[in-house]
Amino acid sequence: MKNKKIFKGALITLLLLVVAYVAYSTMRAYTVKTAAEKKSGALPAFNFRGTDGQPVTPAQYNGETLVIYYFNTGCDHCEFMTKEIISRKDAFSGVKLLMVSEEKAENIAAFVARYALGSYDFIRVAGDAEKKFFSTFGTAMVPSMFIYGKDGRLKEKISGEVSIEKLLTMIRS
């Protein structure tokens, strides 16, 4: 009888610990997301690493219309969007596109080579090895796009695939 009470008490304690951990994790994720959303009006501070090994920071885009494109090299939607962007490259005149992935550098390099992304002046590809995209931008859904105006203010936030026409309309609005 005493063993059953001890077992029951241990089980209840374990269950309470699991519930407390889930509640803590949920609140922490919510806090990080809320903080990122509060900052989302202005281009947040970030420090990614370009495929050329050089740092990529917001200061490099002062006064530019910037689209930050969070992608994954194995994502069909991301591949489709990349092909669409390349096919309409002339429509991106006056726009800078920063593609960011948290994948391994070799996967990103293979993606860049497959689509010859290094040959487009308006496209820069960077890695997020420290996996800070979520805490910086408030989402890590693949694909996601953040359109910032020349004033450095967020104009649009897109989660998921979007038609190239709608993307261009959002950029130009």
Image: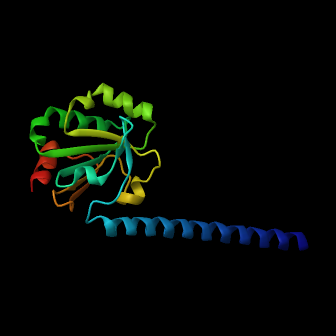
Front-lying residue, 97 or 144? 97
Figure quadrant of the N terminus: bottom right
The structure residue drawn at horizontal position 13% and vertical position 42%, both measured from the top left corner, is 92
| Residue 1 visible in the current orientation | no
Question: Which residue is most to the right?
Answer: 2
What is the total number of numbered labels drawn onto the structure image? 0
Q: Is residue 57 visible?
A: yes
Residue at position x 21%, y 47% in the image: 162
Q: Position of residue 108 (x, y in %)?
A: 38, 34
Relative to 141, 81 lies left or right = left
Q: Position of residue 40 (x, y in %)?
A: 29, 64
Q: Is residue 164 left or right of residue 28?
A: left
**Residue 149 to residue 1: above or below:** above
Residue at position x 43%, y 35% in the image:
105
Q: How is the image coloured?
A: rainbow
Task: Identify which residue, 28 or 148, lies in the foreground.
Answer: 148
- Quadrant (top left/top right/bottom left/bottom right) for the C terminus: bottom left
Q: Quadrant of residue 13?
A: bottom right
Against 51, residue 140 (above or below) is: below
| Front residue (pair 145, 121) | 121
Please report the residue visible at 23 percent of the width from the left and 51 percent of the height from the top: 61
Name the foreground residue: 98 vs 19: 98
x and y percentages locating residue 142 in the rendered image = 35, 47
- The answer to whether 78 is drawn above or below residue 144 in the figure is above
Relative to 66, residue 32 above or below: below
Place residue 138 in its image quadrant: bottom left
Q: Position of residue 128 (x, y in %)?
A: 41, 46
